[in-house]
Amino acid sequence: MLDSLLSLGGLVLLRDSVEWEGRSLLKALVKKSALCGEQVHILGCEVSEEEFREGFDSDINNRLVYHDFFRDPLNWSKTEEALPGGPLGALRAICKRTDPGPVTIALDSLSWLLLHLPCTTLCQALHAVSHQDACPGDSSPVGKVSVLGLLHEELHGPGPVGALSSLAQTEVTLGGTKGQASAHILCRRPRQRPTDQTQWFSILPDFSLDLQEGPSVESQPYSDPHIPPVDPTTHLTFNLHLSKKEREAKDSLILPFQFSSEKQQALLRPRPGQATSHIFYEPDAYDDLDQEDPDDDLDI
Amino acid sequence: MAAVATCGSGAGTTGSAVATASKSNVTSFQRRGPRASGTNDSGPRLVSIAGTRPSVRNGQLLVSTGLPALDQLLGGGLAIGTVLLIEEDKYNIYSPLLFKCFLAEGIVNGHTLLVASAKEDPANILQELPAPLLDDNSKKEFDEDVYNHKTPESNIKMKIAWRYQLLPKMEIGPVSSRFGHYYDASKRIPQELIEASNWHGFFLPEKISSTLKVEPCSLTPGYIKLLQFIQNIIYEEGFDGSNPQKKQRNVLRIGIQNLGSPLWGDDICCAENGSNSHSLTKFLYVLRGLLRTSLSACIITMPTHLIQNKTIIARVTNLSDTVIGLESFIGSERETNPLYKDYHGLIHIRQIPRLNNLICDESDVKDLAFKLKRKLFTIERLHLPPDLSDTVSRSSKQDLAESTKRLGPGCGMMAGGKKHLDF
């Protein structure tokens, strides 16, 4: 499922930490979408352009459109090539493009943007970008937009992380054990239950994705080890079990208020407006159905 | 002479005296009937608006929330002029359904709708409303949905106590065709119903340009715009009685989705002590003032699980009238707990208002769970097993669930001595 992350569109949040870094996964996904022929835009804020492009082949490098905000984030050099409006202006400019193909935007990183911009503005911009294909407007049908955002979990409190994950369509949390990286993928589709999945992977030196089976996991004891499961009926002085014959006898026993299946059907069928009430009487074995009045014998 | 004098003086004063004199009645008592003069009614006449009914307890005018089970829990319905706040569940799956049922109820009853959202276009929200189950088909489908689920197992269980099979899981009052409808969550509302209805939409990204400079004001600009929009609609369409409505009086149903999320420009979900931490509470205060002076009812869904500062949640609860919290089991350990296997989540009724009253209409059922079957959203009483531990206190349901897990080995372990059942 890791390789089909971008097919869903929307915001994909890559949450990494110090032990399990996410930039290599980001670059692997960027390479995959570039090879698929999509347009790829990179907003580089945290590392320099040379460092980001390192490891990519030349044809991939030619397909990437790189917007550099690392070298001159506040536009002090006032050159012509700097995009107005900062990173958010660049995002909006990408959205206003007119060609219809699918677009992948990689934000490296969202943490940098969160530290430099107010969280609400960033959330509104991300929502506008990732839901652009939903509202048609008057422009030509625009292709699907996927936004890949790299977020360093440890830099932020639960507030911004919670706000961004509620906006995200897919959330990938990186973790792992014993040198093997894993990605826990949580997919939120709009009206359905979220699905989650854990995928073990590794990134090869040329930034292609290698999906693997997980390492052998020793089974965790689920039950509490202090209390062994004890059958409560073993040491009792009376018998709680029923043998097969006893169970048959129990089932065939006629209870005093047992009713027949006709009565059951009649009662359970919902009746609209009961005007009269019915008396169901089933004669017992000892009943004497004599219509005569026993008082007739009296001689008064 | 005296009679002529009184007639003369009467003509100068009030109209009723003239009427009395002209009618030549013996008595001056006059039956107060429907006035043909067309002036606005000033008398205590019961307003008969479609889709509303007076509460049997305190006479407030109530509208249905769209779910008859929820109406029952709130004491008959939602009072006009109040706010229903729904605290969203974690993945926002079930609260949109309640929101849409409220709006669909408005369309079915012919009320005017006002839908405000920062996430989705209101036109798209209206397209996804559930279809109403009208007339007798509704009761039949509802019953068979319930019975299909229940009868095979209950036949096995209830051999002796068979009369309890008929007891409904939740007492539902009589659903008349004019108040409270059932909705089919798997079907969409027919298009002609939407087109026949009168609705106004407020989609925040359209109303606010993205490069708006934030003025140092106490309310976020998104909230200010929304309040102005609501006030305009109330004034123009006469819900507050300012313009005398020529047509039949109607109710305005306001629905605000995801209030307080960062998409509204409010940062209470992002930071603990943001710059505008009073923005939401002021919004609710002004909104409630607008609602109290007009014939409208409002539903708000709010992602309270994202709000960082817990005091804001307490203030928001106090500023709303009715507060319901949804807690879904997805992702929590309760999902695999066998006690909760039939249900999708819990409903907590956090607050019920006291309107012109000293007491409020609490229902006696406090443990409620909901489940979304393929078609219907049902709310049922949650039955938990009795607490057989030594301690008598029933502090939380989690303790109960854990004590039942421990009950098995606890019975047999006499030497362990933890739990001891003596016969």
Image (tube, grey):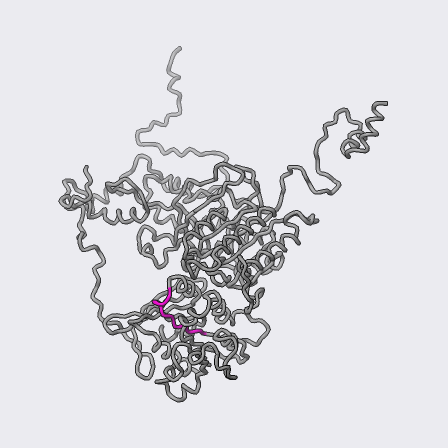
Magenta span: chief secondary structure: strand
Figure check: B228 above or below B42: below
Question: Which quarter of the figure has residue B230?
Answer: bottom right
Asked if the magenta segment contains residue A289, the reply would be no
Residue B177 appearing in the image: no
Q: Is residue B56 above or below residue B376?
A: above
A85 to A226, vertically: above or below: below
Please state the horizontal and vertical placement of residue A202, each as a whole percent of the image: 29, 77
Is B338 placed left or right of A84 in the picture?
Answer: left
Between B213 and A141, which is closer to the camera in this rendering?
B213
> In the image, residue A33 lies at what x, y percent?
41, 80
Left or right: B401 as drawn, with respect to A84: left
| Residue A208 seen anywhere in this rendered image of the structure | yes
- In the image, is residue A147 part of the stretch drawn in magenta? yes
Quadrant of the rendered image containing residue B160: top left
Residue, far bottom: A58
Q: Is residue A300 above or below residue B111?
A: above
Q: Position of residue B86 (x, y in %)?
A: 47, 52
Give the camera-side residue of B269 and B184: B269
Farthest residue to the front: give it.
A76
What number of labels is visible?
Answer: 0
Magenta-highlighted residues? A146-156
Which residue is situated farthest in the right direction here? Answer: B1
**Quarter containing the N terminus of chain B:** top right
Where residue B50 sits: x, y (%)? 61, 47
The quarter of the image holding the C terminus of chain B is top left
Q: Is residue A70 left or right of residue B53?
A: left
Q: Quadrant of residue B189?
A: bottom right
